[in-house]
Image (cartoon, rainbow, N blue to C red):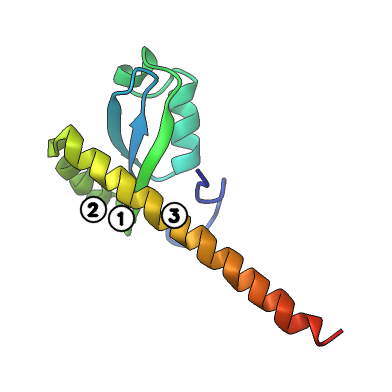
Amino acid sequence: MPLPMDGWNDDKKKNYTYILECADGTLYTGWTNDLSRRVKTHNQGKGAKYTRSRLPVRLVYYEEHPDASSAMRREAEVKRLSRAEKIRMIEDFRKRREEDVQEEASDAVENVDENAGNI
């Protein structure tokens, strides 16, 4: 799954609530301000105690927040959801990501077609 760019630097640092799928099929929810680094940290066995014995983990969901406190609040909300509710969130997230990729590919084809006449 594509992650926000590694080391991406913006004046306002992004914050994320995320869900990992562990090797044993369980789900782990957390928050971070560097999603790519955090997933790598988990997979190096240096993340949360829960994930250390359930490696490797895979990022299956994330959402962006304007600040750390809203990311932490959302983390707490997601942790209170049932597994079935989290699975629905993950499935909806995947569908949206697939639609975004298809839309980007369609736009790219349109741009190529438009520029082909200018050569």
Q: Which mark is residue 67?
A: 1
Which residue is nearer to you in this view: 82 or 99?
99
Above/below status of 46 relative to 6: above
| Res 18 quadrant in image | top left
Q: Which mark is residue 55?
A: none
**Which of pointers 3 and 1 lies earlier in the amino acid sequence?**
1
Above/below status of 12 relative to 24: below
Could one spot residue 15 in this view of the protein?
no
Q: Who's the residue at 39% across and 48% down the image?
A: 94
Give how far apart the Cα atoms at labels 2 and 1 are. 6 Å
- CB atoms of marks 2 and 1 within 8 Å: yes
Q: Which residue is mark 3?
A: 97
Image x and y of residue 10, in percent: 50, 60
Q: Who's the residue at 36% across and 43% down the image?
A: 61
- Badge nearest the viewer, 2 or 3: 3
Q: Which mark is residue 70?
A: 2
The amino acid type found where label 3 is placed reads Arg
The amino acid type found where label 1 is placed reads Asp
Image x and y of residue 72, in percent: 23, 44
Q: Residues within 10 Å of mark 3 (few under 14, many from 20)?
A: some
